[in-house]
Image (spheres, helix red, strand yellow):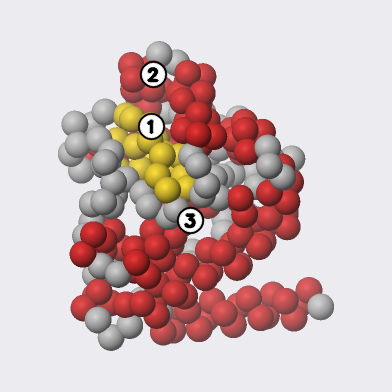
């Protein structure tokens, strides 16, 4: 049964890579690698159903249009001119591709000295930043995301967006380059935490990949 399941997933990925403009990146860890903070069933459903649905529907929405030749960032930068199907699914694909890299089974990763300095300058301390992000996620009514981003001046800021919007989109008030994103849709946490979103927002720091966040911070600054 397990071999058949792996074969079926491989076939799905092979089909995506053969025909699709956009594709899911395979996870760098097993579904159960984040147990204690995020359970295996949630990870598997989230990745194979929800996230897979966004990329499939994005490719359908742009099929036969000039958007097939554009990057995801180019599409996000002009979603105000595009259909809701493109906006929602392009956002969903980008957001989840970033989210998977935010997570790691490696214990006690730390922000780089450069990022930590910026966090302290912007928020006072890393704990204060975590509280601000947790509040942004907890206060988001309905579904959405909490973000740590770099603005056009190279400064860090925390924001929240509804649904699958993100700071790269031309429709959001607080624009910037996301370097950390936390999914606060119920499907990201409900099986383990039920309605206790705050508990999920606290536990996710135990599996935060600060090496990846630090790398994204450096990349964001290099583009300024």
What residue is shown at x 19% (from left), y 31% (from top)?
153
Horizontal relation, residue 56 to residue 191: left or right: left
Q: How many C-alpha atoms fall within 10 Å of the one at disc 1: few (<14), some, or many (≥20)? A: many
Horizontal relation, residue 92 to residue 208: left or right: left
Mark 3 or mark 2: name the one nearer the start of the chain.
Answer: 3
In the rendered structure, are the residues bearing label 3 and label 2 in contact, judged by CB atoms less than 8 Å apart? no
As measured in the structure, the alpha-carbon distance from the residue carrying label 2 to the one carrying label 1 is 10 Å
Query: In this rendering, is residue 5 above or below 49?
Result: below
Residue at image mark 2? 123
Q: How many C-alpha atoms fall within 10 Å of the one at disc 3: few (<14), some, or many (≥20)? A: many
Q: Dot 2 lies on which element?
A: helix
* Residue situated furthest right in the rendering: 1
The quarter holding residue 22 reads: bottom left
Q: In the picture, which quadrant includes the C terminus?
A: top left
The spot of residue 191 in percent (x, y) is: 73, 51
The spot of residue 93 in percent (x, y) is: 43, 62
Residue at image mark 1? 158
- In this orientation, does residue 101 appear? no
Query: In this rendering, is residue 45 above or below 95?
Result: below
Mark 2 or mark 1: name the one nearer the start of the chain.
Answer: 2
As measured in the structure, the alpha-carbon distance from the residue carrying label 3 to the one carrying label 2 is 26 Å
Residue at image mark 3? 96
The spot of residue 25 in percent (x, y) is: 49, 64
Query: In this rendering, is residue 107 above or below 164?
Result: above
Horizontal relation, residue 5 to residue 159: left or right: right
In the rendered structure, are the residues bearing label 2 and label 1 in contact, judged by CB atoms less than 8 Å apart? yes
Q: Dot 3 lies on which element?
A: helix
């Amino acid at each position: 049964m397990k071999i058949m399941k792996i074969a079926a997933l491989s076939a799905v990925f092979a089909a995506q890579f053969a025909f699709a403009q956009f594709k899911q990146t395979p996870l760098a860890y097993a579904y159960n690698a984040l147990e204690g903070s995020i359970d295996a069933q949630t990870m598997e459903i989230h990745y194979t159903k929800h996230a897979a649905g966004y990329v499939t529907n994005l490719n359908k929405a742009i099929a036969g249009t000039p958007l097939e030749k554009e990057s995801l960032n180019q599409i996000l930068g002009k979603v105000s001119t595009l259909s809701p199907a493109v906006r929602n699914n392009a956002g969903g694909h980008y957001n989840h591709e970033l989210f998977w890299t935010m997570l790691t089974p490696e214990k006690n990763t730390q922000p780089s000295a450069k990022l930590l300095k910026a966090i302290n300058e912007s928020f006072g301390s890393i704990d204060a930043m975590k509280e601000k992000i947790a509040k942004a996620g907890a206060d988001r009514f309905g579904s959405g995301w909490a973000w740590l981003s770099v603005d056009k001046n190279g400064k860090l800021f925390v924001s929240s967006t509804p649904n699958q919007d993100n700071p790269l989109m031309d429709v959001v008030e607080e624009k910037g380059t996301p370097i950390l994103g936390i999914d606060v849709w119920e499907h990201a946490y409900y099986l383990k935490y039920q309605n206790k979103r705050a508990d999920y927002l606290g536990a996710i720091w135990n599996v935060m990949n600060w090496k990846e966040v630090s790398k994204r911070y450096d990349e964001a600054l290099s583009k300024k």
